[in-house]
Amino acid sequence: MRILVVEDDALLGDAIQAGLRQSGYAVDWMKDGVSAAQALTTEPYAAVVLDLGLPRLSGLEVLHRLRSRNIQANAQTPVLILTAMDTVDDRIKGLDTGADDYMVKPFDMGELAARLRALVRRASGKTAPLLQVSGVKLDPAAHCVLYQDKPVELSAKEFALLHALMLNSGKVLSRARLEEQLYAWGDEVESNTVEVHIHHLRRKLFPELIETIRGVGYLMPRDKAI
């Protein structure tokens, strides 16, 4: 899953980026509101971690533009405000402007990752923390996969790709969309990287789990869910 972090404090931003990457996310990090708004205009994100006290454009203004559909690409993307502004009025204003969650600094990195997992899960229409499709079980929190109740070892990208497909079971995802979810800015992406990961997933799980829709993309059918 690809996350946008908007934080102007260099040390904190670097720590958040490193922590989320360790949790398996692809992370883009912006340090001001204008850059964040531009990134949200052009790139799809699974969620946004947004500071409020930003230079050039406030976090609330970024959020307002997003929710007023001035930024179409991510109008429905869940937003978690992460800020030192801790009064009740601050929280009310942030949530009423369109935030889906609100955390106050200082914070625990594990809690931030857990809240993001919940936001991404709900945004995809899922309620259970454990994803299950055709005998495959994926636990985002434990970062593990079982097939027929036996553990399956996956690389970080294989896990992220399987996670994206299972969250969107029943929907066809193009190769470009999958690449956008798997890789942050600056990551090197080879031309056939998605195909290679799909091949590995089919070999480690079973071939029929992921269908190729020629000329369109890849599908994990919803009717195989258990």
Image (spheres, helix red, strand yellow):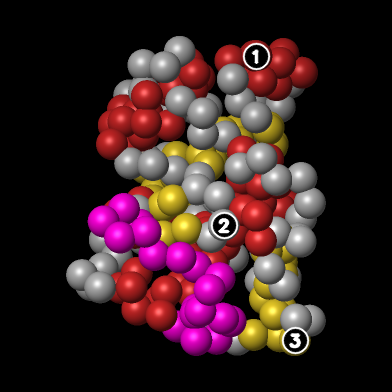
Horizontal arrangement in the rendering, residue 26 relative to residue 193 (left or right): right
Residue at 62% across / 53% down in the picture? 222
Q: Percent x, y for residue 190? A: 23, 72
Label 3 CA crowd tier, 10 Å (few <14, some 14–19, many 20+): few
Q: Amino acid at mark 2?
A: Pro
Whether the magenta-drawn stretch holds residue 104 is answered as no
The correct choice, above or below, for 226 with respect to 90 in the image is below
Local secondary structure at mark 2: loop
Q: Percent x, y for residue 168? A: 55, 50
Q: Amino acid at mark 1?
A: Asp
Residue 109: in sight, yes or no?
no
The residue identified by callout 1 is: 96
Residue at 47% across / 58% down in the picture? 219
Alpha carbon distance from label 3 to label 2 = 22 Å
Residue 187: in sight, yes or no?
yes
The residue identified by callout 2 is: 221
Q: Nearer the viewer, residue 166 or 96?
A: 166
| Mark carried by residue 150 | 3
Horizontal arrangement in the rendering, residue 116 relative to residue 41 (left or right): right
Which circle, 1 or 3, is nearer the viewer? 3
Query: Which residues fall within the magenta stretch?
Result: 200-217
Q: Nearer the viewer, residue 40 or 88?
A: 40
Q: Amino acid at mark 3?
A: Lys
Q: Tell me the quarter of the picture where residue 43 sits.
A: top left
Residue at 45% across / 13% down in the picture? 68
Local secondary structure at mark 3: strand
Alpha carbon distance from label 1 to label 2 = 36 Å
Q: Which quadrant does the C terminus fall into?
A: bottom right
